[in-house]
Image (cartoon, coloured by chain):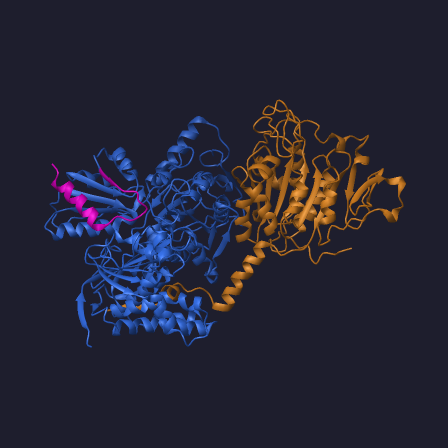
């Protein structure tokens, strides 16, 4: 097993001694999502998780784009920016790169992050900007009332695709891994315990962490993740990813396949030592990527948990180090000296 | 043979060659020598967007024009007195600008049959009489250079490459330029390749010696140093001055500078320059695109930085939505637009003033913002400080409209004392401003209408801002019709109320009937044209707008106090549209959109026509 060197994601953010509770993170704004929306569960999970971090509330910032999920910052009593469509990772990059003392969160959806803002997302990930990116994936456009999204399945019948959508969807986990993300995880709105456990690891990770949260839109794409919630089948479908543990569901197991890849087999057809043990910390993302493909194309067995969690210098730290190095080499900047630099001459 | 020395009050030289011939470097070095000598000067680089356009072709011609004088001058000059043509294409492309009697120094080695054919010369113009109107100096620059470098361990190609230094040496002799700085420069530039340094210096000195000994040049020229205001000077380009202005703004506002930028001609040099000055705590972020550049700058501004993004017109178009977010969240932000010829990609290396209306109106909704435009390369420094002052004081994005001509042109700059620079710092808000310890992020300063700037890390002032309309005071989401009307009007009133200095008018006798007004980089040519008119006994007043939004309070009064108002612009009348709409004054437009600055002579003619017309 590969072990992490450090997981001190919040070491630069000031802590508080004051006791915090869920109430401290609720703003005075009325929450305005549709009744039954999965966003409520995620909001409650985040609000009840934040006190655990013990951070000074004023050093936490939530930045969002546009979409249903992007109203999120208004409901948290921290600093917040509800920005414009797709641009939250870019805006948060400027903030996080210049303020290492902040815990910066990006709240985004599948349209916001993967369609209009796809470019910013992949670049924030490859740079390893110190951000916790929560991607609410409901596989539909909600705020614009029900068009297909970049994660909708092929053939999706929506208002804009009456004969079915033609586009191959993105797999957000595969995309993030391809973009050199150092922390990639998947969880689900209805499982607060798991969601919070993933958030715990994501906040402990210094650098960009991408957390895909399967979120139900009960108005335009209800029951999109029903297989993972149905008590009858969910334990068979859900493959838990836990570092150092064999990758299994109640009835299935992941093993190395003959062709060098990995595959899912019935658990009772293999011995324990044949089952693939999850190594989220492995520097090579190949196996993590292979895991992210297991649920393609059908939703038959879905890995949930942390796919990848590796140490890589965070962007803000690298940037600060260059500034320090410049001062160490040349001394503090002096404006008068700068202006007088170059070839000068005196008149009079 | 003792050569004759002739005194001149000013000279315009144009170096022209292939884009790989090193003409920009040659021009830069001649400029450095001229600056060191103490002349006033002004430069105009002109080059293709292609890095290495096909050799020997007309589109591949790169040129550098330098005007220097024993008095203060305002432009890089209309027509060259001397053209250095490194090949037939350079001759052909520039001959039209050359007045009768001007000197042509042509590199005969490049006037081969093939090169002549490439640009459509049937016969060699150096050998027939077609250049009879000019004084032709046919010099085999390449072969003389190769010969001078025979003793060096260099390939023929490397030796030939030094021909620009030979030409520089010759011109330096011709105009009595000091040589020490150029030699020092070459030593430094080729510090890692001493053989190349020595070769280039040898070529430079060979050029000088050639001038002294050849009969082709019987006269050399002296231009005495100019009597400029006392002070310490350096030569500076607009982009460098703008970068320095941003650094000064950071120091004077006590805010760390954060630059989010994406490379684009002709603005990239500001990114390059700022990235060298990390010791000032400057963070430069080369973003994945234009939108991310401004987004990151805005994010940094939310965190308490002086957020800046630098770009050109196409980039401003992409940034528009984020600039709108800055307008409505009322955060300080500086957007530098180094304008270039458009629309679309246009002509990236050529200048224009065509983004004024985009700066004014190029966003959805009512989204006013202040606009500042520098008027000369060195003025880019002061304009940057002024843009920052407004941004920080009024919590607003500010558009700074430079252009390609200012960006790449250069002039001597009298260095300001740091103690002379304005203190533009503002305090962050650290205390609640509402009842019961509440914080109201949109409760305004009654005088400036600026909202409080409370940054993350400030306890008790946690708040949310965003693109959705905000309730006055609390900043909470509001769809209330009357609140929206109030907020739209308040945001406009804030910008309208920005303190900008009065518009100064230069009208020496106070009895001119015609006012010529301009903005931005046209200051030099307009002022030079005005001088010409006055020299010939004409009367004309001049005013130049540095603040385009809001306009100085006395603008209407100034416009209305003249019988005629002439407004030259390198666009189709964008400021004219604004002035006409705003003041109902029948502004006479003069517009040329050729990707080049105006010429003083051209504008003098236009002004004279307006004076003479009924």
A227 left or right of B404? Answer: right
| Quarter residue B551 falls in | top left
Q: Residue at x 79, y 44 (%)?
A: A262
- Does residue B215 appear left or right of residue A233 in this picture? left
In front of the other: A288 or B128 = B128
Rendered-image quadrant of the N terminus of chain A? bottom right
Q: Position of residue A239 (x, y in %)?
A: 78, 40
Where is residue A155 drawn, in percent x and y?
66, 27
The image quadrant that residue A108 belongs to is top right
User: Which of these two is toward me, A244 or B575?
Assistant: B575
Q: Is residue B100 above or below residue A41?
A: below
Q: Which chain is blue?
A: B
Q: Which chain is orange?
A: A
Picture coordinates of residue B297, whole percent (x, y): 48, 48
| B29 falls in the magenta region | no
Quadrant of image for the C terminus of chain A: bottom left
Q: Decide which of A131, A62 is in the foreground and name it.
A: A131
**Residue B111: image x %, image y %?**
33, 59
Tell me, yes or no, whether the highlighted magenta stretch contains residue B597: yes
Along the line of sight, the residue nearer the viewer: B143 or B292: B143
- Residue A216 visible? The answer is yes
**In the figure, is residue B404 to the left or right of B95?**
right
For residue A258, side relative to residue B272 (left or right): right
Number of numbered discs: 0
Q: Residue at x 13, y 45 (%)?
A: B512
Task: Give the magenta part as a residue range.
Answer: B588-614
Residue A348 vertical position relative to residue A208 in the rendered view, above or below? below
Asked if residue A340 shows in the view, the reply is: no
């Amino acid at each position: 097993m590969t072990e992490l060197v450090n997981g001190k994601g919040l070491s630069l953010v000031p802590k508080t001694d004051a006791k915090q509770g869920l109430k401290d993170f609720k703003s005075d704004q009325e929450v305005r999502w549709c009744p039954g929306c999965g966003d409520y569960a995620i909001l409650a999970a985040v609000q009840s998780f934040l006190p655990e971090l013990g951070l000074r509330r004023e050093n936490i910032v939530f930045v969002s784009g546009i979409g249903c999920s992007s109203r999120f910052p208004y409901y948290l009593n921290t600093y917040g920016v509800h920005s414009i469509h797709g641009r939250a990772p870019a805006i948060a990059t400027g903030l996080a790169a210049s303020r290492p003392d902040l815990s910066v969160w990006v709240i985004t959806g599948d349209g916001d992050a993967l369609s209009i803002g796809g470019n910013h997302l992949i670049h924030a990930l490859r740079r390893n900007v110190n951000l916790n990116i929560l991607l609410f994936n409901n596989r539909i456009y909600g705020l614009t009332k029900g068009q297909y999204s970049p994660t909708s399945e092929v053939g999706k019948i929506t208002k804009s695709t009456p004969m079915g959508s033609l586009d191959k969807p993105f797999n957000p986990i595969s995309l993030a891994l391809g973009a050199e993300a150092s922390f990639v995880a998947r969880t689900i709105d209805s499982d607060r315990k798991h969601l919070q456990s993933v958030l715990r690891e994501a906040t402990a990770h210094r650098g960009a962490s991408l957390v895909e949260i399967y979120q139900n839109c009960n108005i335009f794409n209800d029951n999109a993740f029903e297989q993972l919630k149905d008590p009858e089948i969910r334990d068979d479908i859900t493959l838990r990813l836990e570092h150092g543990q064999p990758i299994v569901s109640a009835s299935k197991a992941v093993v190395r396949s003959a062709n060098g890849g990995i595959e899912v087999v019935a658990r009772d057809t293999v011995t324990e030592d044949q089952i693939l043990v999850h190594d989220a910390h492995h520097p090579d993302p190949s196996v993590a990527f292979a895991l992210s493909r297991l649920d393609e194309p059908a939703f038959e067995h879905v890995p949930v948990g942390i796919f990848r969690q590796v140490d890589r210098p965070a962007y803000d730290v690298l940037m600060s180090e260059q500034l320090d190095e410049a001062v160490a080499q040349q001394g503090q900047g002096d404006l008068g000296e700068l202006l007088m630099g170059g070839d000068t001459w005196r008149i009079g | 043979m003792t050569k004759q020395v002739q005194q001149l009050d000013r000279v315009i030289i144009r170096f022209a060659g292939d884009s790989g011939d090193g003409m920009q470097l040659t021009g830069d070095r001649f400029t450095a020598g001229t600056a060191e000598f103490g002349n006033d000067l002004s430069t105009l680089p002109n080059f293709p967007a292609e890095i290495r356009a096909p050799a020997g072709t007309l589109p591949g011609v790169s040129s550098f024009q330098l005007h220097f004088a024993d008095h203060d001058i305002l432009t890089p000059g209309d027509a060259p007195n001397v053209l250095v043509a490194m090949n037939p294409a350079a001759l052909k492309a520039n001959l039209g600008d050359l007045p009768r009697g001007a000197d042509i120094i042509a590199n005969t080695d490049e006037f081969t049959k093939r090169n002549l054919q490439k640009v459509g010369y049937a016969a060699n113009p150096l050998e027939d009489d077609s250049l009879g109107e000019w004084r032709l100096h046919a010099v085999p620059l390449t072969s003389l250079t190769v010969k001078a470098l025979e003793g060096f361990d260099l390939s023929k190609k490397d030796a030939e490459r030094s021909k620009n230094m030979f030409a520089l040496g010759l011109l330096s002799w011709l105009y009595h330029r000091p040589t020490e700085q150029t030699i020092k420069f070459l030593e430094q530039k080729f510090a890692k390749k001493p053989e190349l340094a020595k070769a280039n210096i040898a070529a430079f000195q060979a050029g000088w010696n050639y001038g002294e000994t050849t009969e082709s040049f019987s006269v050399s020229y002296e231009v005495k140093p100019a009597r400029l205001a006392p002070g310490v000077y350096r030569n500076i380009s607009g982009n460098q001055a703008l970068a320095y202005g941003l650094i000064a703004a950071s120091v004077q506002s006590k805010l760390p500078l954060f630059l989010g930028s994406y490379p684009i001609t002709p603005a990239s040099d500001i990114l390059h320059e700022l990235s060298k000055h990390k010791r000032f705590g400057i963070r430069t972020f080369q973003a994945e695109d234009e939108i991310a550049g401004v987004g990151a700058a805005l994010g940094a501004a939310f965190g308490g930085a002086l957020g800046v993004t630098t770009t050109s017109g196409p980039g401003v178009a992409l940034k528009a939505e984020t600039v709108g977010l800055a307008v409505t969240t009322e955060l300080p932000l500086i957007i530098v637009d180094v304008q270039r010829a458009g629309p679309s990609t246009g002509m990236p290396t050529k200048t224009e003033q065509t983004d004024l209306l985009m700066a004014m109106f190029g966003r959805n909704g009512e989204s006013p913002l202040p606009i500042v435009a520098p008027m000369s390369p060195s003025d880019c420094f002061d304009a940057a400080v002024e843009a920052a002052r407004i941004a920080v004081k009024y919590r607003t994005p500010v558009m700074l409209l430079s252009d390609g001509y200012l960006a790449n042109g250069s002039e001597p700059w009298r260095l300001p004392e740091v103690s002379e620079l304005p203190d533009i710092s503002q305090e962050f808000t650290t205390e609640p401003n509402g009842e019961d310890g509440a914080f109201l992020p949109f409760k305004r300063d009654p005088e400036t209408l600026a909202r409080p700037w409370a940054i993350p890390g400030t306890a008790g002032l946690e708040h949310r801002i965003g693109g959705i309309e905000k309730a006055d005071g609390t900043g909470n989401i509001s769809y209330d019709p009357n609140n929206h009307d109030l907020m739209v009007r308040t945001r406009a009133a804030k910008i309208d109320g920005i303190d900008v200095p009065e518009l100064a008018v230069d009208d020496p006798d106070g009895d001119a009937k015609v006012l010529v007004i301009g903005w931005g980089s046209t200051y030099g040519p307009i002022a030079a044209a005005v001088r010409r008119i006055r020299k010939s006994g004409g009367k004309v007043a001049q005013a130049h707008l540095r603040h385009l939004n809001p306009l100085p309070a006395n603008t209407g009064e100034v416009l209305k106090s003249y019988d005629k108002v002439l407004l030259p612009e390198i666009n189709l009348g964008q400021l004219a549209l604004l002035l006409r709409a705003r003041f109902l004054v029948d502004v006479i437009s003069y517009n040329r959109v050729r990707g080049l600055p105006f010429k003083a002579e051209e504008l003098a003619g236009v002004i004279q026509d307006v004076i003479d017309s009924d």
